[in-house]
Amino acid sequence: MCSCGSYGMQRPSAIAFDVDDTLYDLSWAFHKACDELLGPQVFSERLFQRFRARSDEAYQEHLAGECDFLEMRVRRIWRALGDVRISVSPAEALKIQECYESYQSHIELTGTVRGMLDECVRARMPIAIVSNGNARHQWDKIECLGLVQWFPRDLIVVSGDVGATKPEQGIFDEALRRLAVPADEAWFVGDTWENDIMGPARAGWHTVWFNRRHYPQPPVDVSPEVTVDTEEEMAQVVGELLRA
């Protein structure tokens, strides 16, 4: 359900988007890998939630130099499965990771998201991407999804390229610098509460929370201007901002 605040204000000067689980469904490839190697009864929303949490944890360990990129990706799968009491060896976790990577090379945007981005381009709205992750890996996904069709390469801000990671203010400030707009005229659309809502809000942006996984909103003072649950609602809100 779309939960909208009083966001009917002046037209934004720019809109930025997260990638993973915002512009495409991140669970699809993980679901396929689990079905193929562990059986169709294993995947659950609870497992995927733990996978996301363990991914963030392992990424921070990678940034701290505690593990290389491959070990980071194996750790998150091994730990997430352990969280739901499924025991696999590191070698088995590696096989799941390799299968997951194979399916990730086939990710696609839905027609709804493509239409939303087309509308942004037709409206001449400057749009950017702000995404966490290893630069090569994130750019591989960006290319696979065809996002350079809508987003100029210089407006695709990947943490691995710029040395700042969401929710740090530096990565949002870098996006604003490239967009050449002030924070209070920029909107951010993303799915992760800490990275995509708290981070940009602290940096002065307006926010749209795409709550694809139906998480409860944390009990904090900061709230997004709009909360949406589906791609259709996200596209609707973006369209309203374009027409403001």
Image (cartoon, rainbow, N blue to C red):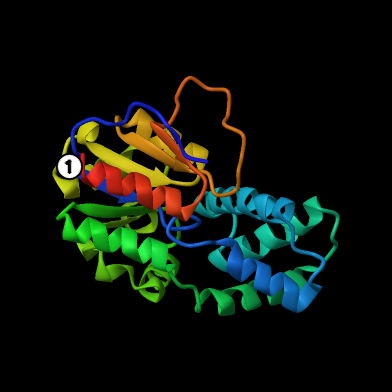
Q: How many residues crowd mark 1 within 10 Å: few (<14), some (14–19), many (20+)?
A: some
Q: Quadrant of residue 136?
A: bottom left
Q: Quadrant of residue 121?
A: bottom left
Amino acid tagged 1: Ser
- Is 240 above or below relative to 182? below
Query: Could you tell me which quadrant the C terminus lies in?
Result: top left
Residue at 17%, 48% in the rendered image: 179
In the rendering, at what x and y percent does residue 15 appear?
27, 47
- Is 190 above or below relative to 26? above
Left or right: 45 in relation to 138? right
In the rendering, at what x and y percent does residue 107 appear?
49, 73
Q: Name the residue at the top extreme.
A: 221
In the rendering, at what x and y percent does residue 183 appear?
23, 34
In the rendering, at what x and y percent does residue 104 appear?
53, 73
Q: Can I make out residue 169 in this image? A: yes
Viewer-side residue, 143 vs 58 = 143
- What residue is shown with label 1? 13
Residue at 43%, 46% in the rendered image: 190
Viewer-side residue, 189 vs 63 = 189
- Is 12 above or below relative to 24? above
Query: SS class of the residue under badge 1?
Result: loop
Left or right: 13 in relation to 157? left
Residue at 61%, 40% in the rendered image: 215
